[in-house]
Amino acid sequence: MRKEIDRRSAAIPDRAERIQAALDAQPRYMKLIASLCDKSGQTLERVTAGDPTLFYDGKTLRQLKPEELDARSPTSTQITWFFITEMGVHLMAEIDGKAAMFDNETRTKIAEIDALSIR
């Protein structure tokens, strides 16, 4: 079966260009997560959910209180993304031109990248 998949995929015209176009068209948060995984030496398996109730201030990732959620404007909502690698569940949050990767259980920062260079 694998041989047939490989044969058919090799026969697709301009396959490399199609793959690159698909990667370029990914949402920005996916590109940030992929870059964080690369920097940390992990392999992204899948992105699971975005959570607007988590807030990252550049130092601490925390759950917002109900009154903080109510006071936020819809345009200032920050989304923290959950994703899975071979090392478990992680989170990605972005602020002030930086994106950071955290361990889901400990909330320890694993990696940080310059987010301004990723479009």
Image (tube, rainbow, N blue to C red):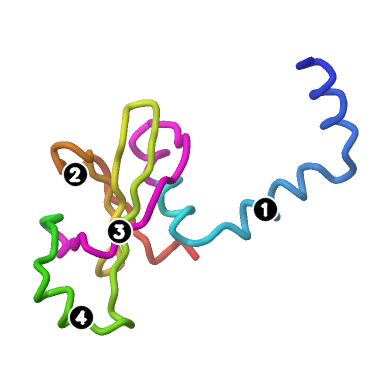
In the rendered image, which residue does mark 3 sit on? 51
Q: Label 4 sits on what residue type?
A: Arg
Callout 2: few (<14), some (14-19), or many (20+) C-alpha neighbours within 10 Å? Answer: some
Callout 4: few (<14), some (14-19), or many (20+) C-alpha neighbours within 10 Å? Answer: few
Mark nearer the N terminus (1 vs 2) = 1
Which segment did they paint magenta? 36-58
On screen, residue 53 above or below 6: below
| Relative side of 73 to 116, left or right | left
Give coordinates of residue 15: x percent, y percent: 81, 42
| Mark 2 element type | strand
At horizontal 67% and vertical 53% (from top left) the residue drawn is 22
The reply to whether the C-beta atoms of the residues labelled 1 and 2 are less than 8 Å apart is no
Q: Which numbered disc covers residue 72?
A: 4
| Relative side of 17 to 31, left or right | right
| Mark 1 element type | helix
The reply to whether the C-beta atoms of the residues labelled 1 and 3 are less than 8 Å apart is no
At horizontal 23% and vertical 44% (from top left) the residue drawn is 102
Mark nearer the N terminus (1 vs 3) = 1
At horizontal 30% and vertical 58% (from top left) the residue drawn is 51
Q: Label 3 sits on what residue type?
A: Asp
In three-dimensional space, the C-alpha distance between marks 3 and 2, rounded to whole angstroms, equals 17 Å
